[in-house]
Image (cartoon, rainbow, N blue to C red):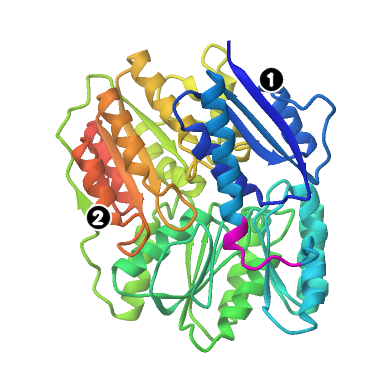
Amino acid sequence: MPVRHVSLRSGVYADSVRLMQVSRDVGAREGVTAVLVAMGTPLNLELAAGMGLAPADGASPDQLLVAVEAVDDDTLATAVAAVDAALAARERAAGPAQAVPLRTVGAGLDALDGDGPALAVVSVPGQYAVAEAADAVAAGRSVLVFSDGVPVEAEVALKRAAHDAGVLVMGPDCGTAIVSGLALGFANVVRRGPVGLVAASGTGAQQVSCLLDTAGVGVSHVLGVGGRDLSGAVGGLATLDALAALAADDGTERIVVVSKPPAPAVAAAVSEAARGLPVPVRSAVLSPETPDLTAAVEGVLGDLGVAVPAWPSRPGDGTAAAPGAVLKGLYSGGTLADEAMLLAAPVLGDIRSNTPLRPELDSALDPSAPDLSARGHVVVDFGDDALTVGRAHPMIDPTLRLEAISDLAARREPAVLLLDVVLGYGADPNPAASLAAALRAAGLPTVVALIGTEADPQCWSRQADALAAAGAHVFASNAQATRHALRLLGAVQ
């Protein structure tokens, strides 16, 4: 029988991304069967109950829940000690302790007495993020809201207040930004340069900035605005402010807008505003007519008079697709998944997805094969909010996708596997290690879009070589990866 440890700690706080990393690292230990290290919010308590690890008397959101299950007492004790060590290391890295720790953005800004940074970062559960972001805006600071789960009406109110205050709200659910060379969230190590990005897409911004870096062209800033900003409900409030900010920046000579398909009226308003700016603006907004981020980057290079390089790639092992093979796209980036579907659908026809191009293609609509197991052409976005509740983003924790690869191989449906692997700060430190083993075991022809740079902590070429050694065809461009998958299927693009 498994043994369990469940405890609550008061006066201890770490952000959700850090706690997910601790849970993932300890959960990977041999003999550890379940781990949840999280603040005691109602959602986390519900997750703990589902795992059989709920505290007996409940918990409050300001308490830290440490819940571990293992195969025996010794393994359990070692795992709990590992949690303690990881949390202690975080505390030491934060610098000298203060007598009274600052618990809110407002308290922190008050302590600065009007000086200090011009940007705040909020990464707390969505129901608490609004108040923290509002404090930053009220103090005249721009704010990056990493948190998701913020109601859309609160997002609109925050962005209107930010506009009136002359600052910018990036997010909610803003996973990537680079401000004056400082990488925030899931950003890559890219050189400084003349191109500024306004991005309603995290992985889209990473693809564009990494390709620019590969071509020798850097970025001035990458201003994420959150995935809903170009929706009809939000109206592009942050996009319009970010465009104006970049146009006023001396180091920005070109602007690129990166997004999934926006609401038509909002797209028109953004285009109209862009035409009135003193800096040229190029669109990298995905649509059936413009389905290719790499082509948009090549257009920017042409504007700058820079030659388009041969985008890096690695050949695979030549495994042929079986007769009747279908496309299975297992993505961590939602924009990259959309790009793959927009490129592949004109050739393959309907593609089912949990984030479909048309509502009737929702993979859950097939009662005999719901969600991730739908037959035929399927593209899954594992980074969608519905699949990240209570767990780390798939760029941090690949568990769900590895399970999907194993399940696909077990079902023996002939397929070509199309994946993205996104490098950079905050992402899995060595994604090829676990993925290569899964690909060898599956034995399917595989194509990988590897998004990153040589300077990233994981190193693009090192990851590419490891994935190619496992048989995968590897491309720095997601569009090129998708087209190669179509060639393996015998389709012509």
Total marks shown come to 2
Q: Where residue 3 sits: x, y (%)?
A: 61, 18
* The C terminus, quarter of image: top left
Kind of residue sitting beneath label 1: Gly
- Magenta segment: 91-98
**Nearer to me, 238 or 423:** 423
Q: Where residue 148 sits: x, y (%)?
A: 68, 48
User: Residue, x 73% and y 84% (percent of image)?
Assistant: 115
Residue 371, visible in the rendered structure: no
Left or right: 245 as drawn, with respect to 165: left
Q: Which residue is mark 2?
A: 461
Q: Where residue 329 sits: x, y (%)?
A: 40, 34
Main secondary structure found in the magenta portion: loop
Left or right: 46 as drawn, with respect to 478: right
Label 2's element? Answer: helix
User: Residue, x 43% and y 57% (percent of image)?
Assistant: 424
User: Residue, x 30% and y 62% (percent of image)?
Assistant: 454
The image shows residue 207, relative to residue 339, as above or below, that is below
Identify the residue at the far bottom of this view: 250
* The N terminus, quarter of image: top right
Q: Quadrant of residue 230?
A: bottom right
Label 1's element? Answer: loop
Q: Where residue 53 sits: x, y (%)?
A: 69, 24
User: Residue, x 29% and y 24% (percent of image)?
Assistant: 442
